[in-house]
Amino acid sequence: MKHSNRIDGKRQRVKTILATTLMFVTAALLMVPFYFMFLSSLKPGTEMLRNGLSLTFDPGVSSFKNYEALNTYRDGIYWQWYKSSLIIMVLQTIVGLVLSSMVGYGLAMYRFKGRNAVFTLVLILMMVPFEILLLPLYRMLIKFHLTDTYFGVILPYLVPPFMIFFFRQYVLSLPKELMEAARIDGCTDYGIFFRIMVPNMIPAFGAMTILSCMNSWNNLLWPLIVLNSNEKFTIPIGMGTTITPYGNAFDVLMPGAVMAVVPIIIVYLFAQKTFIAGLTSGSVKG
Amino acid sequence: MSENGKTPLLKRGFFTNPKVVPYIFIAPFLIFFLVIYLYPFITTILMSFQKIDGPNSVEFIGTKNYEKMFNRNFKQALMTTFRYAFWDVVVLTIVPLIFAVILNSGSVKFPSFFKSLYFIPALTSTIVVGIVFRLAFGTLETAPANRLLALFGQPAKDWLMFADTGNFVLILLTLWRWMGVNIIYYISGLQSIPSELYEAAKIDGANSVQQFFHISLPGIKPVLIYVITITVLGGFAMFTESVALWAQNNPGGVGRTIVGYMYLMGFYKNNMGMASAVGLVLLGLVLAVNLIQLFAMGFFKKED
């Protein structure tokens, strides 16, 4: 008995070492593009053109000079792109969260005629490739003079169906007594939502904030169609313009790439616990 | 007059009428649906039967757009998209599942540390990271991927010049960015399975492979369906990854997807009618594949 326990313990320890090693190696591999990015951002562009990427750190040619070039490249256009990306991200996230949390809550909390039809519609829209609607949407923007505006960029993301779905699932997992107690206290339906339910939905808001920021920060196709003045470009579009058939502006490309990922990673590191908890709690049950 | 909120059960205006309240909550979605989805959708259908040479020159041409659609370039884009979508679904459902099961098994030290770390690539912009991937699989002999080949005595490759190796790089990029997200979805599913099931199975002498196929897999079925559904959509509608590796207008057409072809038709060739027809074919494809998939997974079966 004791003997077999010892063997089991040993086997478990081998398993732990193997599994943890596999996880560790994978983590290291996943970080490789970041090493490349950071090391390259320290090298002069000519060096990048000649030798491409490498994992060797060469103190002779490496410096933070390229980061200063971000301020001077085409009169500091990089920071303009940065500002556009930030404005769009903040607007899109705030509006999306407010509207879709209301809809998700409404679908979860009330029984009314057409509820199932509306929810089915939300599910179907989650399966529709949004890209096919870009042309008519673009024509609509032209009609209403919304091209080259930030509002035009966020318009198709005002009430994202996947957020409605997520909030609905999350609210369904909250105790119904919360709402009933509030109603007895004489709150209006809107008071119940904003004062009592919203504070209880914080983890869901956390998860959706990060997902929305990710989507917006990374979005390429639609902003590319809507925006056409250089100073309103977002980072993905702007970075795209530094890659040309006549050679890439590596001096700007690589430090620009690093600066584009650093802020969002910092935010994530601070919020990751709430974020992952929120994402796991409401997400995809049922 | 100023008694608002004090006696809501007795004094209700239109906006506080219990029959009306739910519709006010969902109103944003209904308006959004009409303006952003339904109206453009109907317009797309109409446009796909039109020849559009500017806002004042619109001509109905019947099904000509559809008849002319299947040229060499479109077939190439179709092929690229199918190849990518297939491998995307296979790799991005299976690999993260393996990692989620291992992370959830209790055999890994610091599982939440790894979970958080694996998610970080998803935060980056595809275009920005695509630059690194493009260089890593560049044509130079000194490109990292070619150096790796040289280690095994293989000749250098022009990775991005060919459909199959190009697809490999695309899948790698997608796996890199998206693995952590699917791992979190799977773990949420795995954690909702009651641990008694596993204990009972252990007593019955089931090994971990049997436990996986008889308890874990059925237990995470809703999550699995969700992951496959969004992966199918993401795979068929892929565009950004292709731009990241090949830039917007790649002459040879390697790596151009259906959405890329649609963009080319609509915005470069100014052929909005054809672009709309291509978009509708894409919609049909995604819905068909997802319906088949959902049907095969038993999504439409009532719980027994």
Image (cartoon, coloured by chain):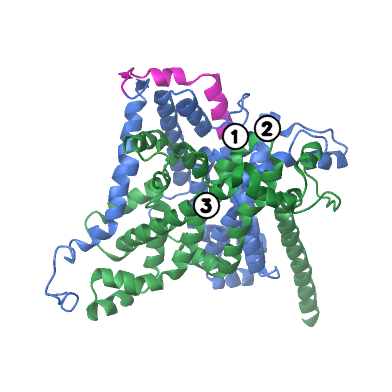
Chain colours: A green, B blue
Gap between marks 2 and 3 measured at Cα: 39 Å
For label 3, the residue is: A83
Q: Which mark is residue B164?
A: 2
The quadrant in which residue B55 appears is top left
Q: For residue B69: magenta? A: yes
Q: Quadrant of the N terminus of chain B?
A: bottom left
Q: Chain of mark 2?
A: B
Q: Quadrant of the C terminus of chain B?
A: bottom left
Residue flagged by tag 3: what amino acid is it? Lys
Mark 2 packing: few (<14 Cα in 10 Å), some, or many (20+)? some
Residue B113 % position (x, y): 66, 67
Q: Which mark is residue B83?
A: 1
Q: Residue at x 39, y 46 (%)?
A: A156
Provide the residue span drawn in magenta: B56-81
Residue flagged by tag 2: what amino acid is it? Asp
Are the residues flagged by discs 1 and 2 in contact, CB closer than 8 Å? yes
Are the residues flagged by discs 2 and 3 in contact, CB closer than 8 Å? no
Gap between marks 3 and 1 measured at Cα: 37 Å
Q: Magenta region's main secondary structure?
A: helix
Give the mark nearest the N terminus, 1 or 2: 1
